[in-house]
Image (cartoon, rainbow, N blue to C red):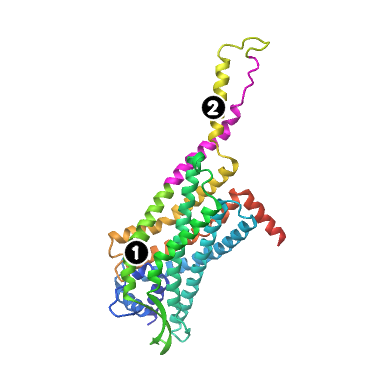
């Protein structure tokens, strides 16, 4: 019986909204926890590559790492939000970074909430339900997992938007230098939120916490129940949202990073060589000192032309700092988004990589790695702001002094 409980607890620990799409239902509503128990028991003895005992070890490591990263990320994003508000939000770039920090903070909160609910669920299982709660903690976990998917979509869209805008600004500065106004930044942030909610609301409305009898505690309590229509809707949404959006944004951000890094190299090269080009006074031409040496006038004019061309294409110190921030944020996003890309592509070609199949533990492990990378992606930006934004660094230090 102890082994059964361990298997159940670990399935429930890493069962996120992504896994629910592989559950088929036949009744009007489905008790998710009971269905998971039967699925896990059916497949526990047939797992390939990663055994149940190995998965237990990986799940513990995941929980500890995710908790540490998410706690620090929530603190860092809260500090970032306060700091940007103290900077008075004077331009669209600041507002865009602020919106990204808010999205990251909310995502971190959902991760913490479902880690807590997982812990409570495991407590129930390990105590053989001698300890139990009026609301099924696993149902709360599933809700927060789904809400986390919704919020992380906002982070994905915001990161892609910032990368595109900054890429346009450095590639075609004359045409796009002032495109990111405060008003446009706010409108885009609201639009991203609406898109995220609209894409996931049909799934959320087909799941609810309902008071029902729980045989484990021999009484009634609020438990998660889902409608079979939810899975049909989720399957229809999964390909355009999780597969196409994930792959498309990944490719777009990679292209933007390549362009911006090329611009950064050109800007750095200009900074190193700018001193070689100076405007040479041509007072000798037609002056009292007579005719300058042959070829000197043409050489001076050529140098002056090079200097003017370089001046027209170089990045200002502020633009250079912003591009550095965006490039690093984008690189972190690309790396941290790779597990999601891998699993979205893998499930299309490996049908057994799913709940209740021979590679279930592999699937759960990749899901855990994906969430770990996403938590890191939502927690790291404050270090980039501190390193490359002197104004952010100044206001952050001032806020420390005041407190």
Position of residue 8 measured from the top left corner of the image (x, y, whole percent)? 38, 77
User: Magenta span has 258?
Assistant: yes
Location of mark 1 (residue): 237
Decide: is 273 above or below 336.
above
Location of mark 2 (residue): 306
Position of residue 60 measured from the top left corner of the image (x, y, whole percent)? 46, 69
Q: Residue extending furthest right?
A: 402
Residue at 57 percent of width and 31 percent of height: 273
Q: What is the quadrant of the N terminus in the image? A: bottom left
The residues colored magenta run 255-284
Decide: is 141 above or below 340.
below
Position of residue 42 measured from the top left corner of the image (x, y, whole percent)? 29, 76
- Neighbourhood count class around disc 2 (C-alpha, 10 Å): few under 14, some 14–19, many 20 upward: some
- Neighbourhood count class around disc 1 (C-alpha, 10 Å): few under 14, some 14–19, many 20 upward: some
Position of residue 383 measured from the top left corner of the image (x, y, whole percent)? 57, 54
Q: What is the quadrant of the C terminus in the image? A: bottom right
């Amino acid at each position: 019986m102890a082994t059964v409980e361990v298997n159940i607890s670990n399935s429930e620990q890493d069962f996120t909204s992504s896994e629910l799409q592989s559950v088929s239902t036949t009744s009007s509503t489905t008790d998710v926890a009971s269905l998971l128990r039967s699925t896990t028991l059916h497949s526990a003895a047939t797992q390939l590559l990663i055994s149940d005992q190995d998965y237990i070890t990986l799940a513990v490591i995941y929980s500890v790492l995710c908790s540490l990263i998410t706690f620090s990320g929530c603190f860092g994003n809260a500090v970032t939000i306060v700091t940007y508000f103290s900077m008075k939000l004077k331009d669209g770039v600041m507002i865009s970074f602020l919106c990204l920090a808010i999205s990251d903070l909310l995502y971190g909160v959902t991760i913490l909430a479902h880690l807590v609910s997982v812990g409570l669920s495991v407590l129930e299982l390990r105590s053989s339900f001698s300890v139990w709660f009026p609301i099924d903690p696993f149902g709360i976990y599933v809700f927060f997992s789904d809400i986390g998917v919704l919020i992380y979509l906002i982070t994905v869209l915001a990161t892609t938007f910032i990368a595109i805008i900054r890429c346009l600004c450095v590639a075609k500065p004359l045409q796009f230098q002032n495109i990111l106004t405060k008003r446009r930044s706010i409108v885009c942030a609201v639009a991203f939120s609406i898109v995220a909610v609209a894409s996931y609301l049909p799934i959320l409305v087909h799941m609810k916490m309902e008071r029902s009898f729980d045989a484990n505690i021999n009484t009634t309590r609020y438990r998660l129940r889902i409608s079979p229509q939810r899975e049909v809707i989720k399957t229809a949404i999964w390909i355009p949202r999780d597969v196409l959006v994930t792959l498309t944004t990944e490719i777009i951000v990679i292209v933007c990073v390549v362009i911006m890094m090329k611009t950064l190299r050109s800007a750095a090269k200009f900074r190193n060589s700018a001193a070689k080009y100076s405007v040479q006074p041509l007072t000798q031409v037609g002056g009292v000192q007579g005719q300058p040496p042959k070829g000197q006038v043409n050489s001076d004019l050529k140098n002056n032309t090079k200097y003017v061309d370089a001046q027209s294409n170089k990045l200002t110190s502020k633009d250079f700092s912003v591009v550095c921030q965006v490039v690093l944020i984008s690189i972190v996003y690309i790396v941290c988004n790779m597990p999601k890309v891998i699993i979205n592509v893998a499930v299309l070609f490996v049908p057994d990589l799913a709940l209740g199949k021979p590679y279930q533990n592999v699937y759960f492990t990749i899901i855990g790695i994906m969430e770990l990378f996403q938590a890191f992606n939502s927690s790291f930006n404050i270090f980039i702001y501190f390193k490359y934004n002197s104004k952010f660094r100044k206001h952050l230090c001032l806020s420390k002094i005041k407190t």
